[in-house]
């Protein structure tokens, strides 16, 4: 998932700005999150493909047209991890 970092950082979505402040931080953080949310991350990558067009929705959450449900699942998993719950 680290391949998504340039697009995620460029999108500058508020919901992930703490974890994705720059490409290096993203590249260090995103693989760990993807491992903890493996099922959700795999489904997201299958949906977005290798070169996604990432934007931010009204809530500041990353999204890609046609992959909204997959982004939502990843963000829910990350939120559960941050709250001390389990991931996917």
Image: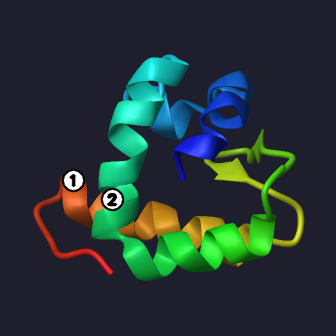
Q: Is residue 52 visible?
A: yes
Question: Which residue was labeled with disc 2?
Answer: 79
| Within-10-Å neighbours for mark 1: few <14, some 14–19, many 20+ | few
Q: Position of residue 10 (x, y in %)?
A: 72, 23
Q: Which mark is residue 73?
A: none
Q: Which mark is residue 82?
A: 1
Q: Position of residue 28 (x, y in %)?
A: 35, 33
Question: Relative to 85, does residue 31 appear above or below in the rendering?
Answer: above
Q: Position of residue 1 (x, y in %)?
A: 54, 53
Residue located at (48% from left, 37% from top): 16
CB-based contact (under 8 Å), mark 2 and mark 1: yes
Residue at disc 1, secondary structure: helix
Q: Position of 35 compared to 47: left or right?
A: left
Q: Which quarter shows the C terminus? A: bottom left
Q: CA distance from mark 2 to mark 1?
A: 5 Å
Residue located at (30% from left, 52% from top): 32
Number of numbered discs visible in the structure rendering:
2
């Amino acid at each position: 998932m680290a391949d998504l970092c340039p697009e995620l950082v460029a999108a500058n979505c508020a919901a992930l700005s703490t974890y994705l402040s720059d490409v290096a931080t993203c590249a260090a953080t995103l693989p760990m999150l993807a491992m903890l949310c493996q099922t959700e991350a795999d489904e997201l990558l299958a949906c977005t493909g290798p070169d996604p067009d990432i934007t931010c929705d009204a809530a500041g959450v990353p999204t890609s047209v046609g992959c909204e449900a997959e982004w939502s699942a990843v963000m829910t998993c990350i939120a559960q991890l941050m709250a001390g719950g389990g991931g996917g």
